[in-house]
Image (spheres, rainbow, N blue to C red):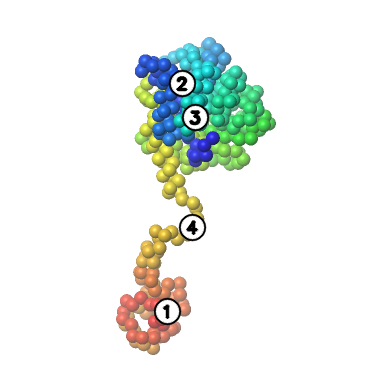
């Protein structure tokens, strides 16, 4: 896996099916367009989803998304639209993604997918929806790969159970992603401070953020998550946010991701390294903006300096005001005019 901070995942999911339909191209051609755009934007990882409608959901499972954006009434109907890919197709996507210099993963939603993905993915991603599916979590954790798991719609105790299951299965590299399982997530529900809670309660594992807030013009949601300590950031990815479908209206397009990456770099730039010292760019201002002891009147050689004879003024090229008590009571060694900046050879 890349070591970028934050590590940025483009959740392509199954959005490319809608693009393929609109452009009248094959889903594979559309998926590769998504990968190309993500690589050009500087994204670290392309993520897909591996499932079959018949193994992920019962036929009567109702929709839980915004049906004004995606009118499909049952989960089964929606998943059935986007489940034509299998092992061969995901292997092709893995090879293509790696050829573009990016990492690759696909979230498995059944045991068969988890098994065939093992030699394709750089890490496993487990959906929030499987957080309580502990046998499945254990199965994935035993594969010897890093695991990133979203923890949306969960109590802290459930997160703890999932993490324990991964550790007991032998998984050595775990990342948990704060997530709000609502599409789109109202910014008032984003509750990004949970990132800090997770980092405090799970100090031995990495913490990140899986975002379902609709993009704003400045991509501040992701920037805020990074500033709160998110090491991995995942967001849905689309080539056209106006397309109908479950994941386009809250996804980011390539330009949104570019803005996010620029924000991350800016944050790193302005945060610095935390060492408190005098920077090179401060040396001249430090000298010119600090104060020296300055005479308030003309003084003759041999006169004794009193408190009233001194005033701290800029620049800081003379005797510092910290030595005021040492200077008071000393003699002037030569005639000096009012407003003279005192130096040690004058007293």
- Mark 3 or mark 1: name the one nearer the start of the chain: 3
Say few, some or many: other residues with alpha carbon within 10 Å of mark 4 (under 14 / 14 to 19 / 20 or more): few
Residue 158 is situated, as x and y percent measured from the top left of the image, at 61, 29
Q: Is residue 281 above or below residue 105?
A: below
Residue under the image location 60 percent in, 34 percent down: 174
Q: Earlier in the sequence, mark 1 or mark 2?
A: 2
Residue placed under numbered mark 3 in the picture: 98
On screen, residue 331 above or below 3: below
- Between the residue at mark 1 and the residue at mark 4, the CA separation in whole angstroms equals 29 Å
- Ranked by sequence position, the earlier of labels 4 and 3 is 3
Q: Position of residue 244 (x, y in %)?
A: 38, 19
- Gap between marks 2 and 3 measured at Cα: 19 Å
Question: Can residue 121 be seen in this snapshot?
Answer: yes
At mark 3, the secondary structure is helix
Left or right relative to 165: residue 185: left
Report which residue position mark 1 lands on.
344
Q: Nearer the viewer, mark 2 or mark 3?
A: 3
Tally of marks: 4
Residue identifier under label 4? 276
* Residue designated by label 2: 14
Could you give the CA–CA distance between mark 1 and mark 2, rounded to whole angstroms?
76 Å
The answer to whether the residue labelled 4 contacts the one labelled 2, judged by CB atoms less than 8 Å apart, is no
Q: Nearer the observer, disc 4 or disc 2?
A: 2
CB-based contact (under 8 Å), mark 4 and mark 3 = no
Query: Could you tell me how far apart the alpha carbons at marks 4 and 2 are, in whole angstroms?
Result: 48 Å
């Amino acid at each position: 896996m890349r070591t970028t901070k934050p590590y940025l995942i483009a959740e392509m999911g199954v959005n490319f099916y809608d693009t393929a339909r609109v452009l009248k191209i094959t889903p594979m051609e559309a998926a590769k367009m998504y990968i190309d755009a993500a690589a050009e934007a500087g994204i670290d990882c392309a993520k897909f989803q591996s499932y079959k409608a018949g193994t992920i959901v019962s036929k009567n499972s109702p929709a839980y998304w915004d049906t004004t954006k995606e009118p499909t009434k049952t989960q089964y109907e929606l998943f059935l639209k986007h489940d034509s890919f299998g092992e061969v197709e995901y292997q092709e996507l893995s090879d293509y993604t790696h050829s573009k210099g990016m990492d690759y993963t696909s979230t498995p939603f059944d045991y068969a997918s988890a098994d065939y993905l093992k030699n394709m993915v750089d890490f496993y991603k487990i959906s929030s929806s499987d957080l309580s599916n502990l046998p499945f979590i254990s199965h994935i954790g035993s594969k010897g790969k890093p695991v990133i798991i979203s923890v949306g719609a969960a109590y802290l105790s459930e997160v703890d159970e999932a993490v324990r299951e991964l550790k007991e299965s032998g998984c050595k590299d775990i990342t948990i992603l704060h997530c709000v399982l609502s599409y789109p997530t109202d910014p008032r529900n984003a509750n990004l401070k949970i990132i800090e809670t997770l980092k405090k309660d799970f100090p031995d594992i990495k913490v990140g953020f899986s975002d379902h807030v609709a993009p704003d013009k400045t991509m501040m949601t992701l920037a805020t998550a990074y500033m709160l300590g998110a090491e991995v950031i995942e967001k849905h990815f689309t080539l056209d946010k106006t397309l109908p479908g479950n994941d386009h209206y809250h996804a980011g397009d390539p330009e949104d991701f570019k803005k996010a990456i620029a924000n991350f770099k800016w944050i790193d730039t302005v945060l610095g390294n935390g060492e408190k010292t005098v920077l090179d760019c401060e040396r001249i201002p430090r000298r010119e903006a600090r104060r020296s002891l300055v005479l308030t009147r003309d003084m003759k050689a041999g006169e004794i300096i009193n408190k009233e004879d001194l005033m701290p003024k800029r620049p800081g090229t003379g005797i510092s005001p910290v030595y005021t008590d040492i200077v008071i009571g000393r003699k002037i060694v030569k005639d000096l005019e009012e407003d003279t900046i005192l130096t040690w050879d004058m007293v």
